[in-house]
Image: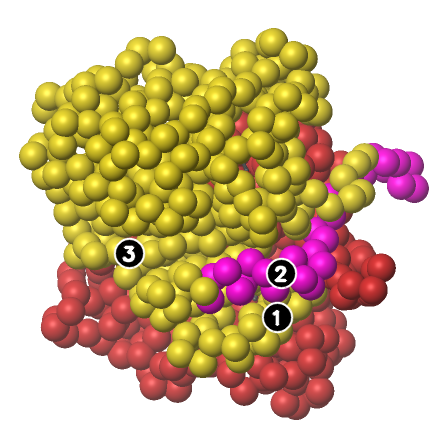
Chain colours: A red, B yellow
Amino acid sequence: MEKRIAILPGDGVGKEVSRGAVTILQAVAELFNHKFHFTYGEIGGAAIDEFGTPLPERTLDLCKASDAVLLGAVGGPKWDKLPGHIRPEKGLLKIRKELGLYANVRPVQYYSSISGISPLRKEVVEGVDMVMVRELTGGLYFGKPSERSVQKGEASVVDTLFYQKNEIERVIRYAFELAAIRKGKVTSVDKANVLESSRMWRETAEEVAKDYPDVQLDHMLVDNAAMQLIKNPRQFDVLVTENMFGDILSDEASVLTGSLGMLPSASVSAAGPYLYEPIHGSAPDIAGMNAANPIAMILSAAMMLRLSFDLDDEAEAIENAVEQVLDAGSRTRDIALFGTPFLTTEGMVEEIKAA
Amino acid sequence: MEKRIAILPGDGVGKEVSRGAVTILQAVAELFNHKFHFTYGEIGGAAIDEFGTPLPERTLDLCKASDAVLLGAVGGPKWDKLPGHIRPEKGLLKIRKELGLYANVRPVQYYSSISGISPLRKEVVEGVDMVMVRELTGGLYFGKPSERSVQKGEASVVDTLFYQKNEIERVIRYAFELAAIRKGKVTSVDKANVLESSRMWRETAEEVAKDYPDVQLDHMLVDNAAMQLIKNPRQFDVLVTENMFGDILSDEASVLTGSLGMLPSASVSAAGPYLYEPIHGSAPDIAGMNAANPIAMILSAAMMLRLSFDLDDEAEAIENAVEQVLDAGSRTRDIALFGTPFLTTEGMVEEIKAA
Ligand SMILES: CC(C)[C@H](C(=O)O)[C@@H](O)C(=O)O
Ligand SMILES: CC(C)[C@H](C(=O)O)[C@@H](O)C(=O)O
């Protein structure tokens, strides 16, 4: 198989972990006889420095001409004081919109080998195996107006939570498709006791559910979901929610297993290319120190092989290698128990490659 | 001292726990020689059943004529299918708006006596002592438009996140006042990398901070806050945020110590009366079974004594009694370890009264 993969390392540790993922993908290509063509593009702070904008046309063209996109991370203190429209994050929001990446998919999985690092009790998180599906191109993130004004002599500000029903429907449908091949349960999260958009969300979920008689649909209020994720995370299979709620809840969920540095994500669109990225940020405090955990990025590459290229065996080879290395006790600093030894980013990549 | 207290039991366990709080307040009145006049009003489902509306004028008048309001809980499956504008929750939203209750204040405190019931590891939650301050009368909860429409042939929906700057300022100022008499730290939570309202929020926090040179101000993005609350909750003193974020984060925070049934809240206004309520809901599954934990409601009454009536000794007497009873091992079902004995609602009230 021959595939073009766009690599957007971005900022901070994004560069290091991207390098790690490419190393692993090359090893997979060799082992399974594929050809992966990697082309590199700038995004975020790196793009601002070079082109004055967080998402240059050139990067976007590169992505559109590729079969999949691997993104590292964006942002850092260097660009924090810039005006809103040229901040690194704008590059992220724009690429989501331009590529039509309407659903962000984040598996949250318990690894027994690193159970010691979760802030939750073992009895609570043991066996957690869920997927967060977050709407990614609508809601408060993109609604207009989003601006200040003076009303009756008072400074005021407004943001707008806007959805078309078809935007709600497609992401919920995605969640049902996923649940159908997993544990058969969708939890749709909203704030239907307050928001009109949530009432439309809930109705739409009910409608979509009719097409999936074998999938169970539950509704949960967002405040309750924030509690249930900590109290009893095992109850969830696929959780689906709108953009802003999803931003908050998926980050909350990512802490459960203590393995923030290990969680991958995929953002999917109607026609591709999909975009894959670790859920962690650019971690400016450890950038360039060869200390970041490359596993989230490497598992993102595995998700790419499975979802974009249908290469299940190859994806599994990576996932098994990661598990094997963890089982053998290899750790980067973020997942090492206090006072125990740990590997560098490159050291971890080498071990996974070897496995 | 002579005070008029409006009691709005509401629905479900709200009735039982309100009764418990009144019992304790009567005991305090006797002990310290005060006169508390209790008058009762309907709200929520109870009000819908009797008056066809979740907040009758008569209840509102009663509150306005009182020195403080004690609210049980509202809602239940019986009223879930009613149209939006006569749902029990609407009573809650309306009373907040009508009484100008702009800040919801929720202390989250670790009780070593019941540490066993937290879903978090002891090392993580031990010593947690924070206050969540949530803006309560603005944002997505009240912004207009909040409606459906058809745009270019597509069904659409909009909700509006609206704030006046002075609404933002007063709640942040409240947080600073609180921090100044606590540990001297305010964490202001927003989504300034995406929302214009959050950028105004952040600027306003910076401005208010100038008036409190002894209070440290940190900003935190809401997604990060959702993580930090679980990873390292001890870092917080006073956390302040807008209405919707506050709804989610304060419920998340309430789970940390495992003591949802023990957490009180106060909602404050410019001119009073303030409103006090437990943070738990009406718990329809155990309503009428004499099984609810009355402590959250009783501690809400203690908050009332302190904040509305300046009766510090009396408040402390209640708080000490609660701690003493817990230390002695008394439990209601929600805070009893699995398989250990527990008291009824009334049994717990009696023990606290005796203490
Ligand atoms: C950087 C920021 C704009 C972004 C978001 O809120 O979507 C990030 O938090 C994420 O979740 O990918
Ligand atoms: C019942 C609901 C409208 C309410 C809210 O969202 O404010 C509740 O969740 C709360 O936090 O008091």
Indicate the quadrant containing the C terminus of chain A: top left, top right, bottom left or bottom right.
bottom left
The residue that label 3 is drawn on is: B129
Parent chain of label 2: B
Say which label, 3 or 2, has the lower sequence index.
3
Label 3 to label 2: alpha-carbon separation: 24 Å
Say which label, 3 or 1, has the lower sequence index.
3
Q: Which of these two is toward me, A276 or B109?
A: B109
Q: Is mark 3 within 8 Å of ligand 2?
A: no
Q: Which residues are magenta?
A: B149-176
Which amino acid type is shown beneath numbered disc 1?
Thr
Where residue A156 is drawn, which disc sits there? none
Coordinates of residue A213 in the picture (x, y in percent): 56, 17
Which amino acid type is shown beneath numbered disc 3?
Asp
Q: Is disc 1 in contact with disc 2, using a CB cutoff of under 8 Å?
A: yes
Determine which quarter of the picture holds residue A42: bottom right
Say which label, 1 or 2, has the lower sequence index.
2
Is residue A177 shown above or below A42? above
Parent chain of label 1: B
Label 3 to label 1: alpha-carbon separation: 26 Å
| Residue found 12% across the figure and 71% down from its top | A340
For the residues beneath circles 3 and 2, the answer to whether they share a chain is yes
The reply, left or right, for residue B15 in relation to residue B339 is right
Say which element carries label 2: helix
The residue that label 2 is drawn on is: B168
Determine which quarter of the picture holds residue B169: bottom right
| Residue found 83% across the figure and 60% down from its top | A151
